[in-house]
């Protein structure tokens, strides 16, 4: 059986879990990271020398980096479903998967300050800069979604990393610009059972 190491409130673990459930794959999840520890043990570092989550074990094949895990699962189990068969559609899906880390960087300071930092220790300037920057980045995605249901046309692996990142942005207690194409796409993601189960959880 597939094994996945990582805690449920990690955005990068959410991506892998969402992908696994979209594909209907059975797997065992092992808590790891932050308060669960595990990631600095010699056994874990032998699998993932970065000491981060998630890590996937597919019958002895070890893989880390959340987007690489999503690509691997989509290619192995989801050809024509999550893995687009058309080369250009697949390239666009890959483009948005890579860009998801750009968006994550824009949201990071707002997330850490508003969700994981006590109120008295929050950096208001960092929150505002992150709010503005993430809104600018979200506008890029909004423009790309005009006339599209999903980032590569059909729902694919391309929607998973950026969808998980946008969920975090949409649920932060801060002001956001009105972006109708992004908001409609996000509502479509929210209607997916695997997204509801694994991604659209209270931020913590």
Image: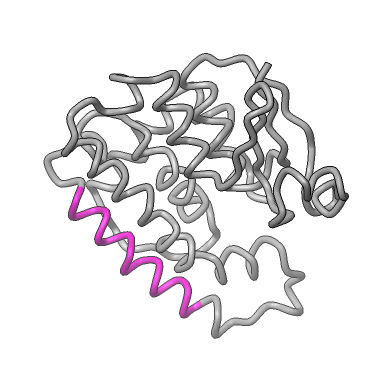
Q: Residue at x 19, y 35 (%)?
A: 87
- The percent coordinates of residue 71 (x first, y second) are 43, 36
Q: Residue at x 72, y 22 (%)?
A: 28
Q: Is residue 92 above or below residue 190?
A: below
- The percent coordinates of residue 112 (x first, y second) are 64, 66
**How many numbered discs sit on the rendered protein?**
0
30 lies left or right of 169? right
Q: Residue at x 35, y 26 (%)?
A: 82
For the record, the magenta segment spans: 128-144
- The percent coordinates of residue 198 (x first, y second) are 58, 32
168 lies left or right of 102? right
Report the residue that reaches farthest toward the bottom.
Answer: 125
Image quadrant of residue 191? top left
- The percent coordinates of residue 33 (x first, y second) are 77, 49
Residue 94 drawn in magenta: no
Quarter of the figure that contains the N terminus:
top right
Q: Residue at x 72, y 54 (%)?
A: 49
Q: Is residue 78 above or below residue 56?
A: above
Q: Please identify the dominant SS of the magenta region.
A: helix
Q: Is residue 166 above or below residue 61?
A: below
Image quadrant of residue 175? bottom left
């Amino acid at each position: 059986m597939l094994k996945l190491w990582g805690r449920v409130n990690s955005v990068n673990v959410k991506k892998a879990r969402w992908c696994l459930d979209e594909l209907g794959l059975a797997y065992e999840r092992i808590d790891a990271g932050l308060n669960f520890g595990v990631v600095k043990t010699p056994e874990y570092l032998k699998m993932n020398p970065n000491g981060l989550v998630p890590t996937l074990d597919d019958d002895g094949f070890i893989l880390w980096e959340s987007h690489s895990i999503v690509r691997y699962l989509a290619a192995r189990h989801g050809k024509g479903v999550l893995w687009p068969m058309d080369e250009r559609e697949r390239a666009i899906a890959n483009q948005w998967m890579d860009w998801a880390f750009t968006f994550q960087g824009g949201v990071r300071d707002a997330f850490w300050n508003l969700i994981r930092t006590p109120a008295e220790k929050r950096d208001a300037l960092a929150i505002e800069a992150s709010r503005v920057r993430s809104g600018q980045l979200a506008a890029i995605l909004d423009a790309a979604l005009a006339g599209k249901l999903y980032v590569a046309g059909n729902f694919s692996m391309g929607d998973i990393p950026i969808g998980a990142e946008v969920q975090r942005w949409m649920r932060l207690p801060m002001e956001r610009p009105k972006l109708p194409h992004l908001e409609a796409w996000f509502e479509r993601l929210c209607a997916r059972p695997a997204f509801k189960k694994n991604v659209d959880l209270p931020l913590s």
